[in-house]
Image (cartoon, rainbow, N blue to C red):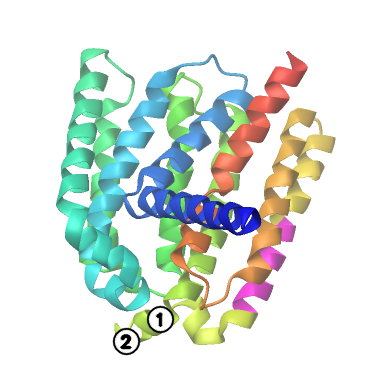
Amino acid sequence: MTRSIAAHRRRQWVSSLAALVRVLVHSNVFISISAASVVVTTIGLADLPFDPRPFFIVVAVTMFVYTVNRFTDLEEDEANVPQRAAFIKRYGRLWLAVGTVLYLAAIGFAIALDVPGVGFMIVPLLAAILYSTVGVKRLFLVKNLFVGAAWALIPLGVGYYFGRPWQFEILFLTAYVGAMITIAAVIFDVKDIEGDRAEGIRTVPNTFGPGWTRIVSQVANVLVAALVPVVVAAGVLSPEFLVLLAFNGYVGAYIPFATPDRGPLFYGFVVDGEHLFLAVLVVVLEWAVW
């Protein structure tokens, strides 16, 4: 009897945790934190002073852009991610209001504090329009490269904020984040094969199949990882950058499990959580060294 009660409580706890994660994923709170984690990684590895303002700006911008995208992609999500589509139909306007308020607050905040490059804060909105309404997402592989380039702007923007956009560490992280997000974007398309086919959107997975997609993505992941120790050995990056190999290990570990039947929590939590994982490692490394 005691074991049965304990097992029931465990199931309830797991169910409640899963529900919380689902809300964080579907509401774009988690992806916003993950995007802002790139700020933490950049500040840590590029030896920049701690400043919470870029973190807040990236959270606000990501929340707004991704919530707008949920509405423009609603028809596709009804086929690809029905749970997320149902969440957006029920709570989407609330989260769009939250995202809009945060975005406008971030712009006002940046203007009031004379944050460098405040004019560039309009770029994410333009990117969202290009991606969803102009039709960039319908171009084979271009949509993945587009998403990678959008995320690559985060470390570059952090460098610009601190007046060091051409610092080699910043440029390397810009290229690295862009490459790794492109790989993640290709993997993300595995779950959307049927819906993308129905919408006439050609992607790597629905063109070459999930198996070849995983193989090519893993090869790309290994090639990017191999570049890290080479650049460190050349002496242009500090040994701290070897922490990126753990990130590549994380990506390499989830790629084999990227199948069409995986739920949104795998893609929205495990895959999207990759940069949060890296940021935690960088913070721990910084503390250990300090």
Whole-angstrom CA distance, mark 1 to mark 2, is: 10 Å
Query: Callout 1 environment at 10 Å: few (<14), some (14 to 19), or many (20+)?
Result: some
Quadrant of the image for the N terminus? bottom right
Decide: is 210 above or below 184: below
In what element is the residue under mark 1?
loop
Residue 42 found in image quarter? top right
In the image, what residue occupies the spot 56% across and 24% down? 43
Numbered disc total: 2
Residue 100 percent across, percent down from the top left: 18, 39
From the viewer's perspective, tell me whether residue 190 is left or right of residue 63. right
Which residue does the image show at 36% across and 27% down from the upper left?
56
Q: Residue at x 68, y 70 (%)?
A: 256
Q: Can residue 119 be seen in this view?
A: yes
**Label 2 belongs to which residue?**
198
Q: Can residue 217 be seen in this view?
A: no
Q: Name the residue under label 1.
A: 202
The extreme right residue here reads: 233
The residue stretch that appears in magenta: 212-223
